[in-house]
Image (tube, helix red, strand yellow):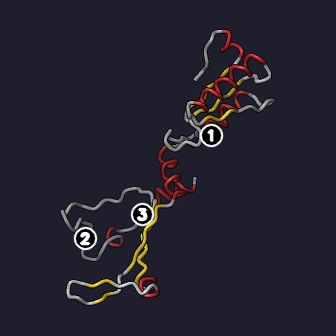
Amino acid sequence: DLAELARETFFLNVPMSHLCREDCKGLCPKCGAELQIKRGIEVGNIFKLGTRYSESMKMTYTDEKGQEQTPIMGCYGIGVGRALASVLEEKSDDKGLVFPMTIAPWHVCLCPLKLEDEKVSAVVNKLYDDLLKNKVEVSLDDRTGVSPGFKFAEAEVNGIPIRIEIGERDLKRDVYTV
């Protein structure tokens, strides 16, 4: 995996002196502890904009000496895409995405094993409606002609936290597989 390779080799052969001010000598300037290189994820940026926009808007402030000054502007941003990517990088596994419930596009995936069966269809549709009424984000895999294993694998790859399987045998025992 290219991302893993980059993460492992990024600072491998870079001396600490190249990563901080010339006078830091690899030590924290506040407490003197040795600086360490740790893996991190960039989720946002800070940009120094200078006076370009404040000058064009004729923005000024009065300093403590009573002098008008043009403020130096900056901006920061936390990208939704970067934030999502950072969560998924930390939470996913070798089978695919693993969304935390708080940001999952769906909380539950209903996987009927034989939707053509009237009993299975009735139970699945009622459960789907009940979940929606209770404000649960639910996905219904209503495809026919697709194997149950394919449905399960796809729910796993898509990171849906809860999968409910409903089949004829489950209904005979009055259970669902969660």
The CA distance from mark 2 to mark 1 is 46 Å
Return the residue nearer the eye: 142 or 23: 142
Give SS at disc 1: helix
The amino acid marked with disc number 1 is Val
Residue at 74%, 31% in the rendered image: 142
Q: Earlier in the sequence, mark 3 or mark 2?
A: 3
Residue 20, label in figure: none
Q: Position of residue 54 (x, y in %)?
A: 42, 83
**CA–CA distance in space, label 3 to label 2:** 17 Å
Q: Do the residues labelled 3 and 2 touch (CB within 8 Å)?
A: no
Q: Could you say which disc has been placed on residue 157 in the image?
A: 1
- The amino acid type, in three-letter code, at marker 3 is Phe
Q: Which residue matches tag 2?
A: 25
Q: Which amino acid does label 2 sit on?
A: Lys
Could you say whether the residue bearing mark 3 is in a helix, strand or loop? loop
- Label 2: element kind: loop
